[in-house]
Amino acid sequence: MHEQIEERFREVVPAIDFCSLRVVREDSETIQVRQGILQPVTSLADTGAMVTVLDKGGMGYAATSDLSKAGLRKAISAARGWARATRKKSVVDFRKVATPAPKGEWKSPVVTPWESVPLAEKIDLLKAQNAKLKTDPRIVDWSGMLWHTRKEQLYLTADGGRVLQEFRYLIPGLSVTANEGAETVSRNFGGFDLGRQGGMEVLGEIRFTEQADTIAREVLELLSAPNCPTGSMDLLLDADQMYLQIHESIGHPLELDRILGDERNYAGTSFVTLDMLGTYRYGSDLLNIAFDPTIQDEFATYGWDDDGERAEKTYIIRNGILERALGGVTSQARAGKPGVANSRACSWNRQPIDRMANLNLEPGASTFDEMVRAIEHGVCMKRNCSWSIDDSRNKFQFGCEYGRVIRDGTLAEVVKKPNYKGISATFWRNLKMVGDRSTFQVLGTPFCGKGEPNQGVKVGHATPACVFGNVDVFGGV
């Protein structure tokens, strides 16, 4: 199929400044067992292509699911028409935008392909985890899920560029809910915060079959636990909460198109301005954030972005100082600032925009036990359950599923409904300790939304646990 589409594209592409074709095929399957009962297995297949044209300073794009020669010719004609219409009317002179002609291939590392394991075996695995979750009459809902996606993407340019990438994603999930009287609480593993590239071997890497026992025990602990205490104190965030803290208060504010004002109508702007790049103290000296496509099994690892830029590890924040924003080739040309290879689209029928990819916090030197021992008065929180952030991505409030009081350097009683709030600059500048490799986890979400029309993409965040000082902590209701 790839060779046929490439031949058709090269036959119909006109003599213009730049033309690219991005062909995407995506197949997914989801298996869920809830309360021991298999739910309908869902399978989805989607194929189409996006044409992008740059000509005489204008830019246009058009999507099509008709991959015939006539369909490609029609899409190119439509994109060329939009390029003519946008000349001298856009905020960007597209003659200044880099148009690479990349060549290469990239594949997700896979040991045990999804399709090599029979469906019945995967169902039996989820039923076994369901049985582990239902340990008490007070547990009223429980489920397990496996969601696999295979995505093939072919990127062609009229001047000879050709990149073929194949991605395999696996998203596992477990959930348990308990009720007693008026109190209902839940614990989860994976689902929206843990996904990786790879095959069925991912389940062994994350010890999937060991998690049901833990979350079933913890949800029952929460039923009788007191609310989280209120006050200013130290906060130890486990990696499964750190990932969302990075996502919301570093990743989104540093998207360059958001800084330029392009996102204000949908999900807010940013408190970051262009003049902060290179000088602004975003956090303490312990804060080192990298755009990093080198961790092969992380969610958003790729060889090239959707504008054909080669992806390489780049520091965004180093020793607390903001060095650059998350902007692809178009935003870089518009802002006159360096960025990264993060022009990404969620599908063939969306244009690439600036997105987070793998945005990781580099490990520090502290073990989990050392961080606990360093805290006289504080709380340890795990796994997000609610979040809110203002329209400049500055003030935030997060709620977590599970908490433990830390008293005199020791983990003490379990507390429920732990919450905390802050302002980005103050919060990150109060980063006191960063966990070492033993606390480091490769996490990510498949549901990061941005853009109009909306684009939901997969984003990776690898991070250790961390300690923050003087945080406003409070209990829920």
Image: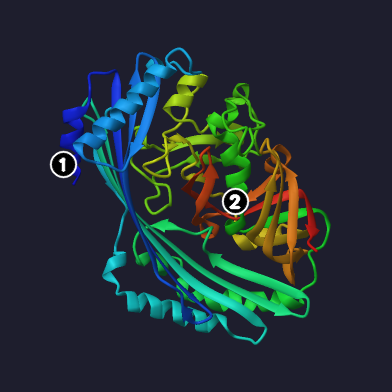
Q: Quick one: label 2, few (<14), some, or many (20+) residues within 10 Å?
A: many
Q: Residue furthest right?
A: 231
- Name the residue located 53 percent from the left edge and 82 percent from the top edge: 132
Note whether residue 429 is visible.
Answer: no
User: Residue 53, labelled with which disc?
Assistant: none
Side of 149 where 410 appears, left or right: right
The three-letter amino acid code for the residue at tag 1 is Gln
- Name the residue located 49 percent from the left edge and 35 percent from the top edge: 315
- Name the residue located 66 percent from the left edge and 75 percent from the top edge: 219
Q: On the image, which quarter does residue 351 sit in?
A: top left
Residue 96 spot, x, y in % from top left: 40, 16
Q: On the image, which quarter does residue 477 sit in?
A: bottom right
Q: Which residue is mark 1?
A: 4
Q: Which residue is mark 2?
A: 244
Residue 441 spot, x, y in % from top left: 51, 57
Is residue 299 placed above or below 183 in the rendered structure? above
Query: Callout 2: helix, strand or loop?
Result: helix
